[in-house]
Image (cartoon, grey):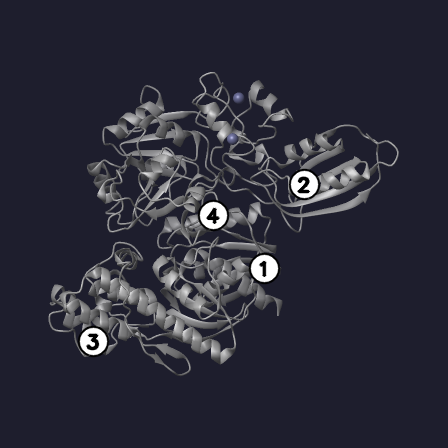
């Protein structure tokens, strides 16, 4: 190999290069170019030494990026010269431990690949019907990783010793399982079991047993990649109703797993972009318009226009789907508001009253991960919940973090973020930090991320709200610099970070509630912002929230507060006031007196008021429900829009009461909910566009960032976006990072870094 003219180089490859078959790929590449040397993992990524003719070394180095395996994400390749040693052959060497400034990356879990799936279905294959088959291109990753570097001994597969057959595949550079850390087979790997409600093993093939239970209308807990799910047949009305009841009257829509893309197409209308997301390796739940004749029970997603569908993403889910041949509901195994159960003993205990049977296995889950949730907006992915398959892939930012940062996120839909170098690692979905279990899950998650990414936070960012448990957690950390970041500033910064844009921009942050710097609850904000700071340049008109948290649960209270503000009372004959005529005067008095009635400029609460007025929803079961149902009711044929005044001043105020008043007049006149919903969405969007135009003229800024959970509303997003485009603004919208509070930790991290840099 090392004839005359041979050179030797030392190469470092950084990025998502562990657990994705990168070392075998390098071996293959070296073989193809006749390069000798070795490759290995270390905490910083992959190290290579390669020797060969200069031209082949160049081609080899270019191939590291250009021909990388499907799950890899090469961020940087650095090359330095070394002394030729004249070795022959190319080999994988042992992983090196030690500290690296820019640690390695852990890959997200990936759905079963086509090659593994065909083995699963091949009666002649030794992995025929084996529920844990995987290879270098697919299988569990993040959820089984216990440490770095990514090697079998640093995963929960360390519990299983490879048999001779698996060891041969693992050691054969020509095999597609070469150095696949979770490699296993029926002889040596994890095993499946079916357990009855009493925890006793059920006789027979576990998949067959579970399928029969489901066909008999039972609720089955299934241990998946990132935790336990509860399953019922999607068309089985009584079973779906029982599932809702046992999950303590869960009101959120359930997701449905379809056997394949064709079956998913009978449930929802899939455009090419949605189908691509559905069938891709990340395997999220894809929200798409439900077909009228979709074979699912009404209670799967009551009041929703869209249905969340997904395809099987582990061999186990494939086996069950193949056997059932009909869609099944797959919802996270927990009580409402608790985190997903993932530790075996705890899951069996917590789910004991919920499930009639269990389909379990003995591969431990190290990190929990809920299913991710995405929708398509203008042909692009819009991530709503970023979890399994996505986390913990890094989000690269153009501004290096001067010191390692931990950002603790918000209270609801919490995620946190650790960041170092040019990379931010947004955690999987943790949930609402309102129970001991969720808080524990948060704290354990932070420790896990710090461990696997080698981050020791020096700066800790948190929300300004003192009662958020994430804020309390931040303030408990010792020996760090704390930086408080205003909620809506963090939203806009998360959008800027996603686009690598440093601002300043006009930011429109519309969401439920976040504490403002003036002590009131914000949520309909127009900020002139960069990463360092912001100015509140405008907002929705503020109203009292009668009863505080009670007004969040009971949208009709927001209607009462608004109508009292506008008319001094409700319009005669207004249905929402009739429905609540006993409590209405009490709530109005409360609002007037300011008794437990904090002022809010929240867009979410404005949607609540209109939803109640339109007769769509008076009381909610989960956050954002009224707004989502109002969006679902929008009549696409309606061209009208409610007018709203702009009240000039510093800050500029959008007279949201005008929209509420117009909706109330329509409702009193018997106009249907679909038209009220459409006129409201269109009117609000038009008012936002006019307000941005005014701020654009005032500041000279031509770029707008849209963020906050309200911009998950595709109708509002489309209306605001197209309006701003007509005004020739450049508009930044979310795609890979959730617009809601699940994305806020990223914004906190970059704001903290920008202030740390100063
Ligand atoms: Zn595979
Ligand atoms: Zn084996």
Instruction: Name the mark nearer the viewer: 3 or 1.
Output: 3
What residue occupies the far bottom of the structure in this picture? 649
Q: Is residue 424 placed above or below 354 in the rendered structure? A: below
| Disc 3: which residue | 564
Furthest residue toward right: 4
**Crowd tier of the residue under label 3, counting other residues whose Cα lies within 10 Å: few below 14, some 14–19, many 20 or above:** many
In space, the residues marked 4 and 1 are separated at their CA atoms by 18 Å
Viewer-nearest of labels 1 and 2?
2
Q: Which numbered marker is on residue 458?
A: 1
Q: Is residue 605 left or right of residue 734?
A: left
Which of the 4 image quadrants contains residue 371? top left
Residue contact at pointers 1 and 2, CB within 8 angstroms: no
- Please give the residue where the numbered disc 2 appears in the rendered image: 64
> What residue is shown at x 48% (from left), y 46% (from top)?
390
Residue at mark 1 to residue at mark 2: CA–CA distance: 34 Å
Instruction: Report x, y in % for residue 293.
Output: 24, 41
- Say whether disc 4 or disc 1 marks the residue closer to the N-terminus: 4
**Residues at discs 3 and 1 in contact (Cβ within 8 Å):** no
SS state under label 3: helix
Q: Nearer the viewer, mark 4 or mark 2?
A: 2
Instruction: Out of 268 and 80, give the one closest to the viewer.
Output: 268
- Mark sitting on residue 444: 4
- Element marked by disc 2: helix
């Amino acid at each position: 190999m090392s004839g005359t003219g041979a050179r030797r180089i030392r190469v470092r490859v950084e990025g998502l290069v562990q657990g994705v078959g990168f070392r075998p790929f390098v071996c293959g590449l070296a073989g193809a170019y006749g390069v000798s040397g070795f490759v290995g993992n270390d905490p910083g990524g992959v190290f290579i030494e390669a020797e060969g003719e200069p031209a082949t070394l160049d081609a080899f180095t270019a191939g590291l990026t250009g021909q990388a395996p499907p799950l890899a994400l090469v961020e940087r390749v650095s090359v330095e010269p070394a002394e030729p040693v004249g070795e022959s052959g190319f080999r994988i060497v042992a992983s090196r431990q030690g500290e690296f400034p820019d640690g390695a990356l852990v890959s997200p879990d990936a759905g079963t690949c086509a090659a593994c799936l065909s083995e699963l279905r091949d009666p002649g294959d030794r992995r025929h019907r084996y529920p844990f088959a995987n290879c270098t291109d697919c299988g569990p990753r993040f959820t089984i990783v216990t440490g770095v570097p990514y090697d079998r001994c640093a995963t929960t597969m360390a519990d299983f010793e490879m048999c001779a057959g698996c060891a041969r595949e693992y050691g054969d550079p020509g095999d597609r399982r070469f150095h696949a850390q979770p490699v296993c087979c029926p002889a040596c790997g994890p095993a499946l079991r079916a357990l009855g409600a009493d925890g006793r093993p059920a006789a027979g093939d576990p998949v067959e047993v579970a399928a029969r239970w489901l066909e008999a209308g039972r609720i089955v807990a299934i241990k998946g990649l990132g935790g336990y799910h509860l399953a019922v047949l999607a068309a089985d009305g009584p079973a779906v109703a029982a599932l809702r009841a046992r999950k303590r009257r869960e009101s959120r829509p359930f997701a449905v797993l379809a056997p394949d893309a064709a079956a998913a197409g009978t449930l929802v209308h899939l455009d090419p972009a949605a189908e691509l997301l559905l069938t891709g390796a990340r395997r999220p739940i894809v929200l798409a318009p439900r077909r009228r004749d979709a074979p699912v029970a009404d209670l799967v997603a009551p009041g929703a226009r869209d249905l969340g569908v997904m395809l099987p993403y582990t061999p186990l889910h494939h086996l069950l789907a193949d056997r059932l041949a009909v869609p099944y509901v797959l919802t996270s195994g927990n009580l409402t508001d608790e985190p997903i159960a993932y530790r075996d003993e705890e899951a069996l205990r917590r789910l004991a009253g919920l499930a009639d049977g269990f389909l379990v296995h003995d591969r431990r889950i190290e990190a929990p991960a809920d299913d991710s949730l995405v929708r398509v907006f203008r042909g692009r992915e819009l991530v709503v919940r970023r979890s399994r398959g996505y986390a913990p892939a890094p989000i690269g930012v153009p501004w290096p973090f001067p010191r390692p940062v931990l950002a603790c996120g918000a209270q609801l839909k919490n995620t946190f973020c650790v960041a170092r170098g040019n990379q931010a690692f947004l955690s999987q979905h943790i949930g609402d930090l309102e129970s001991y279990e969720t808080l524990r899950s948060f704290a354990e998650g932070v420790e896990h991320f710090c461990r696997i990414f080698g981050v020791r936070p020096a700066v800790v960012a948190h929300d300004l709200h003192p009662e958020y448990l994430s804020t309390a957690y931040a303030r408990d950390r010792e020996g760090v610099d704390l930086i408080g970041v205003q909620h809506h500033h963090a939203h806009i910064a998360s959008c800027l970070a996603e686009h690598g844009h440093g601002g300043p921009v006009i930011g429109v942050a519309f969401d439920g509630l976040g504490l403002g710097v003036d002590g009131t609850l914000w949520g309909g904000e127009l900020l002139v912002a960069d990463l360092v700071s912001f100015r509140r340049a405008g907002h929705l008109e503020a109203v009292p929230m009668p009863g505080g948290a009670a007004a969040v649960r009971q949208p009709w209270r927001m209607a009462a507060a608004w109508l009292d503000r506008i008319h001094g009372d409700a319009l005669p004959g207004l249905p929402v006031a009739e429905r609540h005529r006993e409590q209405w005067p009490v709530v109005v008095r409360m609002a007037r007196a300011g008794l437990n009635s904090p002022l809010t400029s929240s867009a979410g609460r404005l949607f609540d008021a209109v939803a109640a007025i339109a007769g769509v929803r008076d009381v909610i079961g989960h956050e954002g429900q009224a707004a989502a149902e109002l969006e679902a009711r929008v009549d696409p044929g309606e061209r009208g829009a409610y007018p709203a005044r702009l009240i000039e001043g510093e800050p500029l105020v959008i007279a949201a009461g005008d929209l509420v008043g117009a909706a109330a007049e329509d409702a009193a006149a018997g106009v249907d909910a679909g038209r009220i919903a459409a006129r409201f969405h269109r009117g609000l969007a038009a008012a936002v566009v006019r307000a941005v135009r005014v701020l654009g003229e005032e500041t000279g800024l031509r770029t707008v960032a849209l963020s906050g959970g309200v911009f998950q509303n595709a109708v509002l997003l489309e209306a605001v976006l197209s309006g701003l485009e007509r005004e020739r603004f450049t508009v930044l919208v979310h795609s890979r990072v959730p617009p809601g509070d699940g994305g806020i930790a990223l914004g906190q991290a970059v704001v903290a870094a920008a202030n740390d840099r100063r």
